[in-house]
C-alpha cells in the first residue's frame, strides 16, 4: 500500500479507477480513460499568465483615495483570497497525488495547483503596489479571526484525508497502535474522506471567491482599482476551469463508473454535501457583513451580496444534480457576468475594450478621441 | 430555420444571424446566466426538453443529461428549452 513514485507493476491504466487503484507509473497521454482531464490541462495552459504582466500602478493612487471603509473591503478580500490560494496551491497535490491512479488526472491536479500558485503570487504583486508595508497585510492573515474561521473549514476535509492516507500507506487497513495511540482506517473510510474532500474543494472553487470578485468588479465599474480587476478576471477564468474539474470528478464518482464504492458513498454523503454547501454560503454571507461593517460601497451592499451568494450557491448545487436550498432565483448583480466573460470570445465591440486591457503590455490609456468616429 | 420554444410558449426563430443560442436568446432580451461564453464554466446551463443541438466547440463544462450549454451551441432541429 506504500506510495511509490514509479509503480513497477505492469498495469492497464485504462482499467484503473481515478483514485485508489495502482499508483501511476508512466506519464502517458496517448490513451486516456477520461479525456476531459487532458482537455482541462490544455485549456489551463492556454490561460497561462504572469501577474507582472498586469500594470497595477494606477491602483496605488486609487487606493490612497479610497475612504477607510472601502480600504477595509478591498484589503480584507485580498487577505481572504490569499488564504484560499495558499491552501489551493498545495493541497490538491498533497492530498490527491499519493492516491491518484490515472496519469491524465494526476497531471490535471498538478496543473490546477500550479495555476493557484500564480494567484498567490499575484496578491503579492497587488499588495506591494498599494502598500509601503506589504508585510503588515500578510502578517495579519495569521491573526485575523474572520479569516482563521474560514481557514478551519477550507482545510478540514483536506487534513482528514491526508491524515488517513498517511496511516493507510504506512500501516494498511485496520487498527494500529502508534506511539501509544490507537488509530483505525479502512479503505472505505478513506474513500469517504476523499469524496467529502472533493465536495468541499468543489464548494471552495464554486462559491468562496465570488463575494470578493463582486467587490473587485464593483470598484472597477467605478474605474477604480482596475489593475486589480484585470488580475481578478484572470483568476476568475482559472477558477471557473477548476470548478469544472471538480464537477467532473464528482460526477464520475457519483456514477460509480470506475469504483462502485464511490457511488454508494456519494449517496451516503448526500446530507453532508448539502451541509457543506450551506455552511460555505452562510460563511460567505457573514463575510459580506464583515466587509460592510463600517459602510457599504457604491453599487453593492450586504443584502445584494448575500442574495448573490444565494443565487450562485443554488446554481452550483444544481450543476451537480443537487436541489437549490435558497429561494433566490434572480442574479441581483447581472453586470458581474460581463466581467467574467472569457477574453477569447468577443461578442460585442465593447468587450474588445475589456479584453485589450487583460494583459498589461497593451496600453490601457486610451482616450475617447482614439476611437474617432468609431460607431458602437 | 429551427425554432426555439421557451417554457412560456414563445417561439424564437434561429435564423443564423446569431452565432449561438445564447446570443439569440439575449437578442430577445431574455436573461440567461453566463460567465465564460466559451463552454468551460457551465454557468449558462439550460434544460433541453426536446430536439437536438450541436456544439460549435466541444464544451469542457460538465453537462448533465437533458441539459445543454447555449453559449456554444446552435439548434439542429426545432428545440424546446427551459431557462433556469
Ligand atoms: S457561459 Fe460558460 S459554459 Fe456557457
Ligand atoms: Fe485560485
Ligand atoms: Fe481554484
Image (spheres, coloured by chain):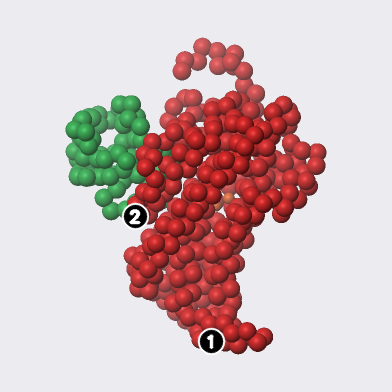
Chain colours: A red, B green
The chain identifier of the residue carrying mark 2 reads A
Q: Provide the residue designation for mark 1.
A: A175
Q: Nearer the viewer, residue A97 or A214?
A: A214
Q: Are marks 1 and 2 on the same chain?
A: yes
Which residue is found at the position 31% from the left and 46% from the top? Answer: B68
Q: Is residue A235 above or below residue A260?
A: above
Element on which disc 1 rests:
strand
Element on which disc 2 rests:
loop
Which mark, residue A321? 2
The chain identifier of the residue carrying mark 1 reads A
Q: Among all residues in the image, which is located at the extreme top? A: A373
Question: Reading the chain from its start, which is encountered first: label 1 or label 2?
Answer: 1
Residue A283 image point, x, y percent: 54, 49
Question: Which of pointers 1 and 2 indicates the residue nearer the eye?
Answer: 1
Residue A303 image point, x, y percent: 50, 35
Rendering quarter of residue A371 = top right
Q: Nearer the viewer, residue B52 or A232?
A: A232
Task: Mark 1: give few (<14), some (14-19) or many (20+) Cα within 10 Å.
Answer: few
Q: Is residue A63 above or below residue A164?
A: above
Q: Is residue A279 visible?
A: yes
Q: Among all residues in the image, which is located at the extreme right? A: A132
Q: Nearer the viewer, residue A167 or A69?
A: A69
Task: Mark 2: give few (<14), some (14-19) or many (20+) Cα within 10 Å.
Answer: few
Q: Is residue A249 visible?
A: no
Residue A289 image point, x, y percent: 57, 40
Which residue is found at the position 22% from the left and 45% from the top? Answer: B49
Which mark, residue A347? none
Amino acid at each position: 500500500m506504500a506510495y511509490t513514485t514509479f509503480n513497477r507493476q505492469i498495469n492497464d491504466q485504462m482499467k484503473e479507477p481515478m483514485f485508489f487503484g495502482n499508483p501511476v507509473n508512466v506519464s502517458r497521454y496517448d490513451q486516456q480513460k477520461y479525456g476531459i482531464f487532458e482537455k482541462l490541462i490544455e485549456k489551463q495552459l492556454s490561460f497561462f499568465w504572469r501577474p507582472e504582466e498586469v500594470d497595477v500602478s494606477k491602483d496605488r493612487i486609487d487606493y490612497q483615495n479610497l475612504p477607510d471603509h472601502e480600504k477595509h473591503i478591498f484589503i480584507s478580500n485580498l487577505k481572504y483570497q490569499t488564504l484560499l490560494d495558499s491552501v489551493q496551491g498545495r493541497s490538491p497535490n498533497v492530498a490527491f497525488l499519493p492516491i491518484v491512479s490515472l496519469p491524465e488526472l494526476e497531471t490535471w491536479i498538478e496543473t490546477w495547483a500550479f495555476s493557484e500558485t500564480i494567484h498567490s503570487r499575484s496578491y503579492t504583486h497587488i499588495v506591494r503596489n498599494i502598500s509601503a508595508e506589504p508585510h503588515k497585510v500578510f502578517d495579519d492573515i495569521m491573526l485575523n479571526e474572520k479569516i482563521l474561521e474560514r481557514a478551519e473549514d477550507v482545510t478540514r476535509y483536506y487534513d482528514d484525508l491526508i491524515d488517513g492516507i498517511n496511516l493507510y500507506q504506512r500501516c494498511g487497513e485496520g487498527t494500529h497502535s502508534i506511539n501509544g495511540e490507537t488509530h483505525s482506517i479502512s479503505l472505505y473510510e478513506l474513500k469517504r474522506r476523499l469524496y467529502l474532500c472533493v465536495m468541499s474543494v468543489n464548494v471552495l472553487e464554486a462559491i468562496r471567491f465570488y463575494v470578493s470578485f463582486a467587490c473587485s468588479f464593483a470598484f472597477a465599474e467605478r474605474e477604480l482599482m482596475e489593475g486589480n480587476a484585470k488580475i481578478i478576471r484572470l483568476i476568475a477564468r482559472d477558477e471557473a476551469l477548476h470548478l469544472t474539474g471538480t464537477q467532473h470528478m464528482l460526477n464520475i464518482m457519483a456514477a460509480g463508473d470506475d469504483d462502485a464504492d464511490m457511488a454508494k458513498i456519494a449517496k451516503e454523503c448526500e446530507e453532508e454535501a448539502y451541509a457543506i454547501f450551506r455552511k460555505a454560503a452562510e460563511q460567505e454571507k457573514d463575510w459580506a457583513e464583515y466587509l460592510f461593517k463600517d459602510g457599504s460601497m457604491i453599487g453593492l451592499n450586504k443584502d445584494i451580496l448575500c442574495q448573490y451568494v444565494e443565487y450562485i450557491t443554488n446554481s452550483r448545487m444544481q450543476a451537480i444534480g443537487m436541489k437549490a436550498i435558497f429561494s433566490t432565483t434572480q442574479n441581483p448583480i447581472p453586470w458581474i457576468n460581463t466581467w467574467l466573460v472569457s477574453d477569447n470570445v468577443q461578442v460585442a465591440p465593447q468587450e474588445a475594450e475589456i479584453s485589450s486591457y487583460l494583459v498589461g503590455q497593451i496600453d490601457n490609456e486610451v482616450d475617447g478621441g482614439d476611437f474617432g468616429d468609431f460607431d458602437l | 430555420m429551427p425554432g426555439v420554444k421557451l417554457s412560456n410558449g414563445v417561439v424564437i426563430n434561429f435564423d443564423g444571424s446569431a452565432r449561438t443560442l445564447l446570443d439569440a436568446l439575449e437578442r430577445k432580451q431574455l436573461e440567461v446566466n453566463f460567465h465564460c461564453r466559451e463552454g468551460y464554466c457551465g454557468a449558462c446551463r439550460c434544460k433541453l426538453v426536446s430536439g437536438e443541438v450541436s456544439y460549435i466547440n466541444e464544451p469542457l463544462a460538465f453537462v448533465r443529461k437533458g441539459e445543454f450549454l447555449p453559449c456554444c451551441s446552435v439548434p439542429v432541429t426545432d428545440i424546446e428549452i427551459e431557462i433556469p
